[in-house]
Image (spheres, grey):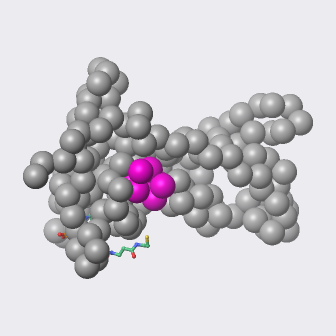
Amino acid sequence: MSLKPKSAEESKAEMTVRMFPSDANPAGNVFGGEILKQIDLIAGLVAQRHSKKNAVTASIDRVNFLKPVLVGNALILNAKLNYVSKSSMEIEIKVEAENLLTGIRTLTNTAYVTSVALDESGKPTDVPPLLLVTEDDKKRFAQGEQRMLQRKRERKHE
Ligand SMILES: CC(C)(COP(=O)(O)OP(=O)(O)OC[C@H]1O[C@@H](n2cnc3c(N)ncnc32)[C@H](O)[C@@H]1OP(=O)(O)O)[C@@H](O)C(=O)NCCC(=O)NCCS
């Protein structure tokens, strides 16, 4: 039975996490690993919302740390599906750091995470197709498809 298509709006998520000294180095710069953890967490949430299955992270594309995140900042993550194939889903995550004293927000990272939905026996399983509602949805889907093809090409050479 084919699965009912679902829009990216249905599964998108926003998460705000305050950064504490235990998340940072002695100079107060939040660890890259802490930011990656939050990226992984929100991507998994979106993937599970869409698929209604256990979803695991298959890959995270190269993540650049554009600006520092400091202790006391709020880390704001926005995550949305770009592209869905058979069992895999590409989620785009935008990360901002908010200085809570000034209210100024700075874009610190953009990441693409691929999650794969698994069935009860741990095998990749089909996920609902992505319903493309807006022109932006269509553009994101087409670009996501290109990145997915590129990832496949790179895996062939590993
Ligand atoms: C991800 C995983 C389930 C893929 O299993 P697999 O047996 O290689 O599956 P397949 O080759 O049949 O690929 C299944 C799908 O995953 C995609 N995929 C597999 N490896 C991938 C990778 N490294 N990056 C992106 N997509 C990947 C395939 O393109 C395919 O997509 P499609 O079904 O939409 O066409 C498996 O590699 C795994 O379990 N990895 C460990 C995951 C994990 O522990 N993550 C951290 C904890 S959440």
Taking the image as shown, residue 57 lies to the left or right of residue 78, namely: left
**Residue 4 versus residue 12: which sits nearer the camera?**
4
Q: In the image, residue 25 lies at what x, y percent?
A: 79, 67
Give ligand 1's quarter of the image.
bottom left
Residue 45 counted in the magenta span: yes
Residue 135 counted in the magenta span: no
Instruction: Residue at 29%, 38% (x, y): give it.
Output: 6
Whether residue 49 is situated above or below residue 158 in the rendered picture: above
Instruction: Residue at 82%, 55% (x, y): give it.
Output: 71
The answer to which image quadrant residue 98 occupies is top right
Total numbered labels: 0
Q: In the image, residue 114 lies at what x, y percent?
A: 35, 57
Instruction: Residue at 76%, 65% (x, y): give it.
Output: 23
The answer to which image quadrant residue 67 occupies is top right
Residue 145 appears in view: no
Give the farthest residue toward the front.
Answer: 1
The answer to which image quadrant residue 120 occupies is bottom left
Residue 25 appears in view: yes
Taking the image as shown, residue 106 lies to the left or right of residue 91, namely: right
Q: In the image, residue 49 lies at what x, y percent?
A: 41, 51
Q: In the image, residue 48 lies at what x, y percent?
A: 40, 56
Please state the extent of the stretch shown in magenta in the rendering: 43-49
Whether residue 97 is situated above or below residue 37 in the rendered picture: above
